[in-house]
Image (cartoon, rainbow, N blue to C red):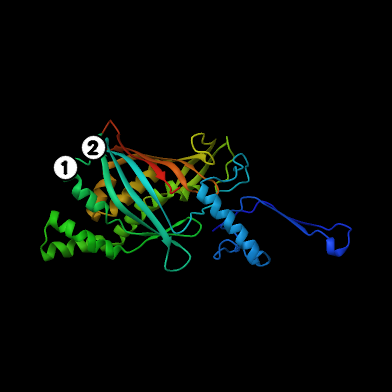
Amino acid sequence: MRAALATLAVGLVFASVPRTQQPKITQILAGDLGYGDVSCDHSESRITTPNDQHPDIVRERQTKLKATKASGRSAPLPQDAATVLSTFAWPVPGSVVIIDTTTKKQRTAKSRYTMNFFRHEDGKSMRVRHEDYEFLEIEGQNAKTERMQKLVASAEAMAAVIPDYRIHQSGRYLETIDIEEMLDRIMPLLTKRMGDSDEQVTRIRAQFRRPEFNELMQGTLSKYWNSWVGEWIGWDVAAGKTVEQMSEADAFGVKVPCVLRRTHHGGAPDHPGHVRLSLRAIVNGQEAVDAMVALFAKVNDKQSVQEMRDQLENATMVRHLEVITRIDTLQPAWARFEMRTTLKKTGSDKPEEQIERHEYTFAWPK
């Protein structure tokens, strides 16, 4: 984990009394010190505290930590301090139930799944797995009726084979893993829809093994994780403030310059102990065109890519993220991801607009 320590002051006070009665007081002031940042509470921490490893001290601290987590309460956060940086500190192992309301191509669906996370085999990073995926509503209709279940069965089955991914102890997305396992699970579904001849199966597997597909999968999963956690790591904008700057965005695997606007909206009244943060990134002109072509190239042949490049005159991409989260752990209660893409094709007077929007609610164990 990355701990941003703003201030560390140690004072020793010794009174002029006989040695046997002499008080020994150590005062430590640490800004943004999370419960997992020091080794007395978290053995994998890079901040070692050898003098704080006495069994009585460790036992007392861990007892208080367990009581705090069990009660669902914590000490008030210094939400107005400009020096407080957000820290990733999810309780591992753990789980959270996510409800995702998705709007795409002017159609809306609501789904629910459980995100389980546990220590990866390397002993340091975190492995994330999505399970129990189910649709709740499709275009406002109950997806649990017998008729709707027949319509969404294939989509639910496809969603159930999302591969696991790995998260750095700082909260940064690392990689998608077990792609081959995902292929083994998805092939029966694909061959049922596209044909099960040996030639067809070989072609489908080859398509999914392309490096471009792996990059696309990495980009898809990371953009959702980043809207929940990744973009908020090390947040340094004070409450009530907005910072706008030129930055660099990762648009479909292409690094492009963008205008980045970050806002700290302060505390979230409906979620005590949480703050509301937002981020908006705008990519215009040729940089946006290059990003769109790069995305298209991941799943199409060179001729089709060149045709798209010739047809695409201009593009604008606006990515808006918003989250209600805890600054000290980055456990979100609510999040929103929106990507608005405007394409201007050669010979067309009216630009095409595409909107993808996800609104998430997170139900953490009490």
Q: How many marks?
A: 2
Residue 116 in sight in this render: yes
Give the side of residue 348 with respect to residue 176, left or right: left
Residue to which mark 1 is pinned = 146
Expressed as whole percent of the image width and height from the top left, the position of residue 359 reads 37, 40
Give the side of residue 329 with respect to residue 5, left or right: left
Please tell me the numbered disc located at residue 106.
Answer: none
Q: Is residue 188 positioned above or below 85 on the image?
A: below
Give the side of residue 272 with respect to residue 116, left or right: right
Expressed as whole percent of the image width and height from the top left, the position of residue 274 reads 52, 41
Name which residue type carries label 1: Glu
The kind of secondary structure element at disc 1 is helix
Front-most of residues 63 and 279: 63
Hey, which quadrant is residue 302 in on the image? Answer: bottom left
Task: Determine the residue positioned at 27% across, 57% down.
Answer: 161
Task: Say few, some or many: other residues with alpha carbon within 10 Å of mark 1 (under 14 / 14 to 19 / 20 or more).
Answer: few
Please tell me the numbered disc located at residue 142.
Answer: 2
Task: Determine the residue positioned at 61% across, 39% down.
Answer: 80
